[in-house]
């Protein structure tokens, strides 16, 4: 598998969690590398492995979940555990009898935090680690310093080579390991489309009682077209003879299998005219591009669409970096009713707020910092830094705690 060739920076978090938690769940979209990571950690430590995508294994757990868990070895990896949801309550009982750390590594392709029946079963007994598709830093095999600098002392003045068409190629490729083994953009796009068909027919059908899934491919395409835009259920429901309530239910399913994500708005008591609508982001920029049939030639003619995909690409890169850190980072967006906005607002603890704005061009003017200045004013002493990412060559100062930063520093180690 392609991800076996690259470091997974979540590995350290998984190892640390197994040292003091009875159950650790690694969840994320299918084909992002969960099994590889679980076995990378589990196999050398003597963990047995069971995969519930295997029909006989799933049938045994379905028919007698209590007996199945009772007969498990002391340390096990249970792969795609969301396919046998009744196991969560049985594992809870087993853990309550013996809370020895490191007993279970679970993997799942559905977000249990959005499935209360599952998450409630193991509350207080489980640590959850989100695994994303490969980041650019993992592909480059180096641990990035971007978040440390954003939330710390800032970026030093240094040169960086422009990416140009290479940036477009990175955005369109996405981060799913099997897609990245394909040698051409056309073959990667074919993998993306087949992947989405499989998710709809298997995981979404498993996670819901909805039998008529015909609208979902078009809804996914509509969501891809709205990536990095304010969430608008009316606009998404317009092409379908479906109610907004039904569209919201469908979108919740897409969110549960990590295909889309809603980015909540940032609030401040200092400002009263803030937009309170979340933003919609697709789970992987490469998937979104393939759904929209965008390639290197067509995206060059649609800079607005590329700007949307690039913003989603950066949001996903930052989310992937944040998932490796011990201290949690909360993500928001900032927008007021005059249209002044910041693409991403990052909060660490109660005292650190940073903003990230994304520009597709290679030049920057002071106007690009208008949203960050407003965020700086609203956050007050909590504001640590605001950056505009651009495809330029230099780190440039644009005022106190404000910098233009080459986008390739997202995955640089210094």
Image (cartoon, rainbow, N blue to C red):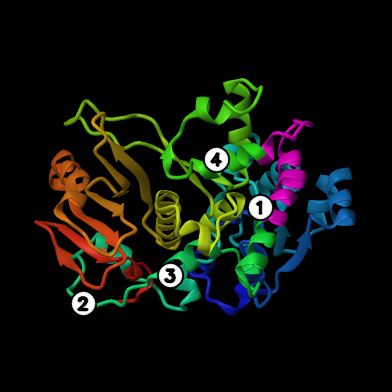
The Cα–Cα distance between marks 3 and 4, rounded to whole angstroms, is: 25 Å
Q: Is residue 369 above or below residue 236?
A: below
Left or right, 153 with respect to 2, comes to: left
Q: In which image quadrant can residue 158 be found?
A: bottom left
Residue at 82% x, 46% y is: 65
Q: Earlier in the sequence, mark 4 or mark 2?
A: 2
Q: Which numbered disc covers residue 294?
A: none
Q: Quadrant of residue 275?
A: top left
Which residue lies under the disc numbered 4?
A: 223
Picture coordinates of residue 401, whole percent (x, y): 14, 57
- The residue sitting at 60% across, 45% down in the picture is 111
Spatial distance from mark 1 to mark 3, Cα to Cα?
36 Å
The front one of 286 and 60 is 286
The quadrant the C terminus occupies is bottom left
Q: Secondary structure at mark 2?
A: loop
Per the model, the C-alpha gap separating discs 1 and 4 is 23 Å
Tell me the SS state at disc 4: helix
Q: Give how far apart the Cα atoms at labels 2 and 3 are.
A: 22 Å
- The residue that disc 1 covers is 108
Q: Earlier in the sequence, mark 3 or mark 4?
A: 3
Q: Give the residues drawn in magenta, as a range.
A: 193-217
């Amino acid at each position: 598998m392609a991800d076996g060739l690259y470091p997974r920076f979540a590995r350290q978090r998984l190892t640390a969690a197994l040292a003091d938690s009875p159950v650790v769940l690694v969840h994320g979209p299918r084909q992002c590398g969960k099994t590889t990571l679980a076995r990378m950690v589990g196999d050398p430590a003597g963990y047995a492995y069971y995969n519930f995508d295997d029909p006989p294994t799933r049938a045994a757990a379905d028919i007698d979940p209590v007996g199945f868990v009772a007969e498990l070895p002391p340390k096990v990896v249970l792969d795609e555990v969301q396919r046998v949801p009744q196991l969560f309550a049985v594992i809870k009982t087993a853990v309550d009898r013996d809370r020895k750390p490191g007993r279970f590594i679970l993997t799942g392709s559905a977000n249990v935090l959005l499935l209360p029946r599952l998450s409630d079963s193991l509350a207080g007994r489980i640590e959850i680690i989100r695994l994303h598709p490969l980041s650019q830093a993992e592909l480059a095999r180096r641990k990035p310093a971007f978040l440390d600098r954003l939330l710390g002392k800032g970026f030093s003045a240094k040169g960086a080579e422009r990416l140009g068409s290479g940036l477009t190629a990175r955005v369109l490729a996405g981060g799913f390991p099997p897609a990245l083994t394909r040698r051409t953009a056309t073959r990667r796009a074919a993998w993306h489309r087949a992947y989405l068909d499989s998710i709809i027919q298997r995981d979404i059908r498993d996670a819901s009682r909805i039998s008529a899934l015909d609208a979902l491919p078009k809804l996914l395409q509509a969501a891809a077209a709205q990536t990095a835009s304010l969430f608008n259920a009316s606009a998404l429901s317009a092409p379908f003879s479906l109610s907004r309530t039904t569209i919201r239910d469908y979108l919740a399913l897409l969110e549960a299998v990590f295909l889309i994500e809603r980015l909540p708005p940032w609030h401040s008591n200092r400002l009263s005219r803030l937009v309170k609508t979340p933003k919609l982001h697709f789970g992987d920029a490469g998937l979104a591009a393939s759904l929209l049939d965008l390639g290197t030639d067509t995206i060059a003619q649609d800079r607005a669409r590329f700007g949307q995909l690039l913003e989603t690409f950066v949001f996903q890169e930052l989310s992937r970096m944040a998932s490796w850190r011990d201290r949690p980072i909360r993500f928001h967006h900032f927008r007021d009713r005059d249209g002044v906005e910041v693409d991403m607002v990052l909060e660490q603890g109660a005292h650190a707020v940073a903003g990230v704005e994304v520009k597709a061009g290679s030049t920057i003017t002071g106007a690009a910092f208008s949203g960050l200045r407003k965020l700086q004013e609203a956050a007050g002493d909590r504001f640590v830094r605001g950056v505009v990412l651009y495809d330029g060559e230099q780190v440039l100062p644009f005022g106190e705690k404000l910098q233009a930063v080459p986008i390739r520093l997202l995955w640089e180690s210094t």
